[in-house]
């Protein structure tokens, strides 16, 4: 199955991805910023941050639940599957099941390298997605909180 082979390749790519500084380590700057600003992030003050997706994070959409396929579990029927593969601070590869909207938003962020909270809201309220303003704000806050805690996104304080 092609999707399973791709998923296995993504796990390897995530494990070997370089850090933002071009080094194969978690950036010290990111750790300091994350720790220093954890209080602001904890109360959802994301409007002060720019978000980016590290090279080791992969938002993915598949037709089959590739992360559960094994010798004992071979799905025959397609099932839309949305996952995010990422490398945690211990260099362990993790994945989390998610939804199409999260994958879509993370892909938007990847395509633009670094975006603001407001740009994420604008994207979700655009004609293509059409979420209402309050729902978009709540969605982005929850997504930023979850994936920042997992270290699957990078938040940088705007200067």
Image (cartoon, rainbow, N blue to C red):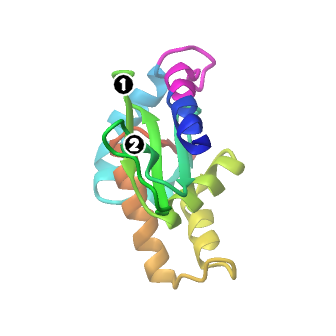
Residue at figure coordinates x 55%, y 33% from the top left:
10
Position of residue 70 relative to residue 105, above or below, is above
Please state the extent of the stretch shown in magenta in the rendering: 12-25
- Residue 128 picture quarter: bottom right
Q: Is residue 152 left or right of residue 150?
A: right
Q: Which quarter of the rendered picture does the N terminus lie within? A: top right
Residue 12 in view, yes or no: yes
Asked if the magenta segment contains residue 146, the reply would be: no
In terms of secondary structure, what is the magenta stretch mainly?
loop
Tell me whether circle 1 and circle 2 mark residues in contact (CB < 8 Å): no
User: In this rendering, is residue 54 above or below 112?
Assistant: above
Q: Quadrant of the C terminus?
A: top right
Which is more toward the observer, 85 or 70?
70
Residue in the picture at 39% in, 28% down: 32
Q: Which residue is mark 1?
A: 92
Which disc, if any, is residue 29?
A: none
Earlier residue among tags 1 and 2: 2
What is the x, y in percent for residue 129?
A: 62, 77
Badge 1 density bin: few <14, some 14–19, many ≥20, Cα 10 Å? few
- Between disc 1 and disc 2, the foreground one is 2
Q: Position of residue 85 (x, y in %)?
A: 46, 40
Q: Position of residue 19 (x, y in %)?
A: 56, 23
Is residue 54 visible in the rendered structure shown here?
Answer: no
Q: CA distance from mark 1 to mark 2?
A: 20 Å
Q: Describe residue 33's horizontal placement relative to residue 121 as left or right.
A: left
**Residue at 33% across, 34% down:** 35
Q: State yes or no: residue 23 in magenta.
A: yes
Residue 54, relative to residue 45: is it above or below?
A: above
Task: Tell me the residue that label 2 is attached to.
Answer: 69
């Amino acid at each position: 199955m092609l999707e399973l082979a791709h998923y296995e390749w993504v796990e390897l790519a995530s494990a070997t991805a370089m850090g933002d500084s071009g080094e194969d380590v978690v950036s010290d700057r990111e750790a300091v910023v994350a720790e220093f600003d954890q209080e602001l992030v904890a109360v959802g003050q994301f409007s002060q941050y720019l978000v980016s997706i590290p090279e080791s994070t992969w938002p993915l959409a598949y037709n089959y639940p590739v992360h559960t396929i094994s010798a004992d579990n071979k799905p025959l029927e397609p099932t839309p599957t949305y996952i995010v593969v990422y490398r945690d601070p211990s260099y362990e590869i993790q994945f989390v099941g998610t939804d199409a909207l999260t994958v879509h938003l993370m892909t938007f962020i990847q395509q633009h390298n670094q975006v603001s909270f407001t740009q994420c809201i604008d994207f979700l309220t655009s004609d293509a997605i059409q979420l209402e303003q309050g729902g978009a704000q709540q969605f982005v806050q929850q997504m930023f909180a979850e994936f920042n805690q997992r270290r699957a996104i990078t938040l940088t304080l705007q200067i």
